[in-house]
Image (tube, grey):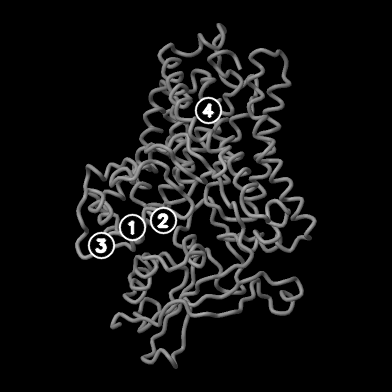
Amino acid sequence: MDGWAAVDFEFARQVLQRGIAALYVVAFVSTLNQFRPLLGEHGLLPAPELLTWAHGGVAKGRKWSPRLLHAPLTRRAEPRGAWAQLHPTVFRYLRYTDRRLVALCVGGVAVAGALAAGIPQLGPPWVPMLCFLALWLGYMSITSIGQTFYGFGWEMLLLEAGFLAAFLGSDDQPPPTVVIVLFWWLVFRLEFGAGMIKIRGGREWRDLTALTYHHETQPMPGPLSRQAHLLPRWFHKGEVLGNHFAQLVVPWFLFAPLAGLGVPGPVPAIVGAVAAAIVIATQLWLVLTGNFAWLNWMTIVLAFSAIGVPGVGRVDAGGGASALPVYWVVVTCAIGLLYAWLSWAPLRNLFARRQLMNASFNRWQLANAYGAFGTVTRERIEIVVEGTLDDDPHTATWHEYGFKGKPGDLRRIPRQFAPYHLRLDWLMWFLPLGRSLDDWFTAFLVKLLEADAATLRLLDDDPFAGQRPRYVRAVSYRYRFTTRAEFRESRARWKRDRRRPVMGPVSLRG
């Protein structure tokens, strides 16, 4: 570090700007493919109805329920009014249509792709700043009306990272020290917050048994999840201990490079880089053993902010401050002061008895509180959706609908989708955890009865090849990974039992 300029963190800036931009590409593509059947004009939870309700009206033909604003993984800590429950969105002023949503996503992919390629960074610092702010506001416009389908902690993480990336500057100057430090503060809240929510959460994190279950019961297992689950118990206990060390101890050392401002030598920078490397290593293990959208990939990208590589980049001979335009020093310092003011609430939350997990304390989703999996479920209950062409549901032959990511076919190897986010599959995991079925699931069954083409494209297999079923129903099973001996006998990755009816049979006539 050299005063105002983080002269040794050019490599970190390149990873941050390009990595965050690449994840924005993934997020906009995910929205382009899924938003319309889930939340579009004819979606399961139509966004226009939400906007009508938020304006104080009542959606035609449907009484809107504000509880649909509440997300499975996200809590909002700001006051509750009609628009206070919605974060800023361009669709407040510009009437929502599916075409406008597509235009916003295509524009977002184009801008994010240019940033990932490093093109805007070739100009003055205000050019990448405007590009990243456009991504931030554009994607916030989507998440604000995304309801439960966009209620995940990594949505607000992407927004906050995009906002901070806007002030990293251009290639012809070193990155500002204050912004690099704000990235360390973001990683600290992300990791330490997750560690604290676990220590305060379920007993399984304290008795070191959490990962004995988690690989099997996580929302969307990956190709190696079964192998991880079958590892010995002592290994799973070691995983939990390693997790606690990586999330509760290591984050404090991310700030070690700040000591380089007053202590000569490479030791402070090395300590920070080692801390970042530990964070990256633990996140790579999570990438290998699960599908958590872009949460792990974003954490990896953000952790690179603490890795300084001397000699990379172009720095003026005069030193750090002279290498930064005065106006840019003023802008970045103003952002630092803004964050100092906004950070009081999340800092207090980290040490509060009732710690909020994935909470935003302002409508702009900056300086958020993060965390995940404060408790771990011990059984995997899957909702299986079935349909039939027969007239009598009591004697009918039922056929299962296949989902892309969630477990279904007992022989299929779980697939790797992350950092892509399968929103419908994720919410199917949450259904058994609730006290009642959500409104979106009832709407989903109706779409299946109508053989709605857009909805069917969200699935991996339609057993009726586009034909309308007479009836659909939902049943639940307990799923578990097969042991090695069971796999040798059946070649199945999963075993299921305890079938129980959840809904139906239902038909359009009913």
218, 122: nearer the viewer: 218
Asked which quadrant contains residue 257, the reply is top right
Q: If you read the primary sequence from the N terminus, does the residue marked by circle 3 or circle 4 appear first?
A: 3
C-beta proximity under 8 Å, tags 1 and 2: yes
468, 52: nearer the viewer: 52
Q: If you read the primary sequence from the N terminus, does the residue marked by circle 1 or circle 3 appear first?
A: 1
Q: Where is mark 1, residue-wise?
A: 39
Asked which quadrant contains residue 221, the reply is bottom right
Q: Residues within 10 Å of mark 2 (few under 14, many from 20)?
A: many
Residue 80 on image: x %, y %:
34, 45
Q: In what element is the residue under mark 4?
A: helix
The numbered dot on residue 149 is 2
Quadrant housing the C terminus? bottom left
Q: Is residue 490 left or right of residue 381?
A: right
Amino acid type of disc 1?
Leu
* Label 1, label 3: how far apart the Cα atoms are: 16 Å
* Label 4, label 1: how far apart the Cα atoms are: 34 Å
* Label 1, label 2: how far apart the Cα atoms are: 8 Å
Q: In what element is the residue under mark 3?
A: loop
Q: Nearer the viewer, mark 3 or mark 4?
A: 3
* Label 3, label 4: how far apart the Cα atoms are: 43 Å
Residue 95 on image: x %, y %:
21, 48
Q: Where is mark 3, residue-wise?
A: 63
